[in-house]
Image: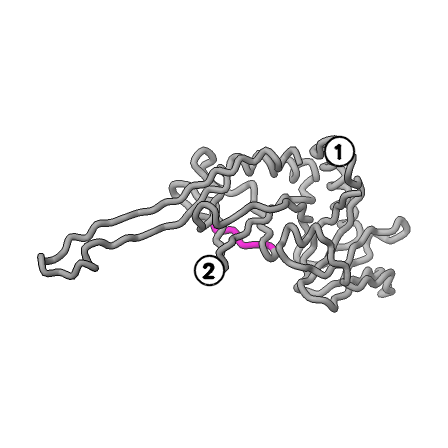
Amino acid sequence: MSFVSHWMVAISAVALTAQAEPSSPEAPQALDRVEVVTQRSTVMPYSRWVSAVQPVHRISGGQLRQGVRLFSRDKSRALRVSVDDDAHSQAISPLLGELYVVPHDLPMEGAQAELSVNRSDGSWGVGNFALVPQLGPQPPDVAAVRQVLGGYRAVYRERFPLSWRLLSRSEASLDVCLPQAGGVLRVVATDGRALIELPMMRTPQEHAQTTGLSLHCASLKPEVGWDGQARLEYPDQAVVLLGFRLL
């Protein structure tokens, strides 16, 4: 992807060593020196992240944000992703699994701010990117779903390079996903009728590549005749992703 493939990943590790003088010549050798090690690597300057993802949000009319998979080979402690400048450190929680949607509008000093992880060089990695619908806290209506999919088509036309457009579809789906099987996505008309019921049983490979999880999803493309006020119903724990796939 043109707005992902040119990320230049800058990696650094910081080690701070403090010397402690022994209290007397008879002090044990083990107390002669104290070492404090801080592990931190820069994924990229925050300004570079902003320049890559802000156009996605703008072109889609605020319907989409871009996320990226950040993972650690060291599973002994939690990965901490943050945006840091000289005065602030803003922790970024994963949306699901290893998928992080880092906002492009944090109040950080642009020139100094960095997107970073609490890992040393070689123990972490960057995976695939994702496009994440921006929906309210309540399950959306069909009109909102159509707006999200229209936002994707605009991003597809303006931001996807020709080589990618030749291999991918201009149409996408709204994928409602859970880490476990058994969920159901329903579209319910204003009179209470269920227009469609979709079991969350698909396991799209593209979502596994962006979250690091095997998800169970239902994919929705609203039918032409559906009323825009018809609402989606799905489990509270579900996460909504955008499904766009290779041909």
Tell me, yes or no, whether the highlighted magenta stretch contains residue 106. Answer: no
Q: Which residues are magenta?
A: 91-95
Of residue 99 and residue 10, the one placed in the foreground of this image is: 10
Badge 1 density bin: few <14, some 14–19, many ≥20, Cα 10 Å: few
- Amino acid type assigned to the residue bearing label 2 in the image: Arg
Q: Position of residue 109 (x, y in %)?
A: 45, 37
Q: Is residue 170 visible?
A: yes
Measuring 78% from the left and 34% from the top, which residue is drawn there? Answer: 166
Q: Secondary structure at mark 2?
A: loop
Q: Position of residue 65 (x, y in %)?
A: 64, 44
Q: Which residue is mark 2?
A: 77
Residue 214 to residue 4: above or below: below
Q: How is the image coloured?
A: one colour
Of residue 228 and residue 57, the one placed in the foreground of this image is: 57
Q: Position of residue 205 (x, y in %)?
A: 71, 53
Q: Which residue is mark 1?
A: 157
- Residue, far right: 225
Residue 217: quarter of image: bottom right
